Image (cartoon, grey):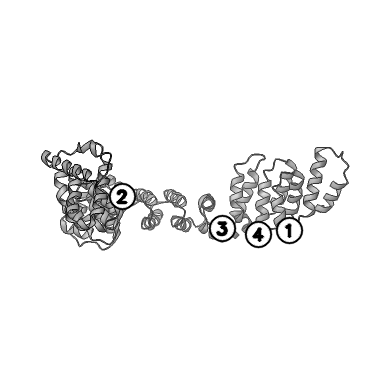
Amino acid sequence: MTSTWEWLDRLKSRHLPESTWAERRRHEALELLANARGGGSWIELSTHYNGFVREVAVRELSRLSSPEALVALIERLNDWVPQIRELALAAMNRYLTPAQAPALLFALPSLMALAARHRGDHGPTLLAARAVLQSAQIRDEVLAHFRGRQGKTARYLFALLLEQGVDTQSLLRLALAHRELTVRLAAVAACEDLPAADAAPLLHEALARPGAKVRVCVLRALLSRVEDPAPLLRDALLDASPAIRNLARWAAPRHDVDALAVLAERLRRDMPGGKRPWLGILGLAAELDVSLDMPWLNEALRCDYPSVRQAAVRLLGDEHLDELLQALGDPSDKVFQVALGLLHKLPWLALNAGVRARLDGHWHDLPTSRRAAILNLMSSWQQIAYLLQRLDAEPVAEALWLRQIEGWCQRQYQIVDPVTPKDERAALQQRLKDLAAAGRIHSPRLALFAG
């Protein structure tokens, strides 16, 4: 092949009118190329807007043999100048051998992107690259690359390896444990094409791994590939994943499995020690609307795992007011919010006294947001009654309680409180007027509800 510099000499010897566009481009290219040396420079110049520059860069890159050079050449396969595309294709063809597998694997994202570009017919190049990557002598290298990749690259390599049909079970076992979710899902679908005897062991292994989205697909595939799905469904009904339990509850009647009987049998055994068994029991009880005995609920409420305590709180009913109020002291914000939501459904008359007692013991220890949320569990007039009572009980903290009272006044617009007797409301209104008259509180909203 004629050297790049001989080609440049011929370019310099051409005589074109100084004012032509081609001559200006040629001079610009010669100035840039005069200082270009080394692969990095040629890779950078291969994307230059000047076609002369890109052409020289591709010629130089064709002399190199490196993964980075291959990526640059693949980009130029879709160049808008036909001559540059031809030069890049000729250079690319030298990489289409098993010996260049490392470079092809490095450049795989660029190769896949080329499939969506249409300035030329890239089909033969892509098919040739795929054939090289499917060569038996580099299968181990491709497999190793597949293990560490994610996204589109991992999916492409899985499809490529599966298409070979060599040691399919080992490949599927690897794919079912892959870190890329979409590869695991594709592997489950591929297992469905295997005979049941071959697919079932692979799917059982996959069912034991985390990842509810994949495990649901695995369970669905397994149900049609095992002779007796009942044991599988009994375990799935007590799974920690709500998605797995939902599928199991749907399939259970079709295979004569009674979900209530499964739960009852489990409750006759010892209490679980781990998070996932607890979540399975509590989740199934909630879904079947089954009330657990207090020993079970108390044990779950004392569990070290916040997710278990949260699930246990969801099972507490109106009759568990003390436990719900106790859950307001849980260090987990999620548990606190679940308890708060359930308490808001209870009538004010049932809550006022218990909330007072809770605030009496913990007001100064509570974060501001929790303190306000708990106070709002009481009816409106009972809130200000509580604040006024604390003002009287703690004169040394008068400034604190006056600020709380002013804050309550500022938050009111129209009070709805059918549980506080009329005479008590009148007394509270008068007390607020007296505080305002003495200059101890100042609120422009006071006249709206204390007038």
- Dot 4 or dot 2, earlier in sequence: 4
Q: How crowded is mark 4: few (under 14 residues within 10 Å), some or many (20 or more)?
A: few
Q: What residue type is labelled 3?
A: Val
Residue 37 visible within the image: yes
Where does residue 424 sit, x and y in percent of width and height?
Answer: 12, 42
Q: What residue type is labelled 1?
A: Gly
Q: Which mark is residue 99?
A: 4
Foreground mark, 4 or 1?
A: 1
Q: Look at mark 1 in the image and give the residue it sits on.
A: 38
Q: How far apart are marks 1 and 3 (CA)?
A: 30 Å
Q: Look at mark 3 in the image and give the residue it sits on.
A: 142
Decide if residue 80 is on the left or right side of residue 236. right
Q: Distance between the residues labelled 4 and 3?
A: 13 Å
Where does residue 422 sit, x and y in percent of width and height?
Answer: 12, 38
Q: Which of 433 and 176 is in front in this view?
A: 433
- Dot 1 or dot 3, earlier in sequence: 1
Q: Which residue is drawn at 18% across and 49% down?
A: 388
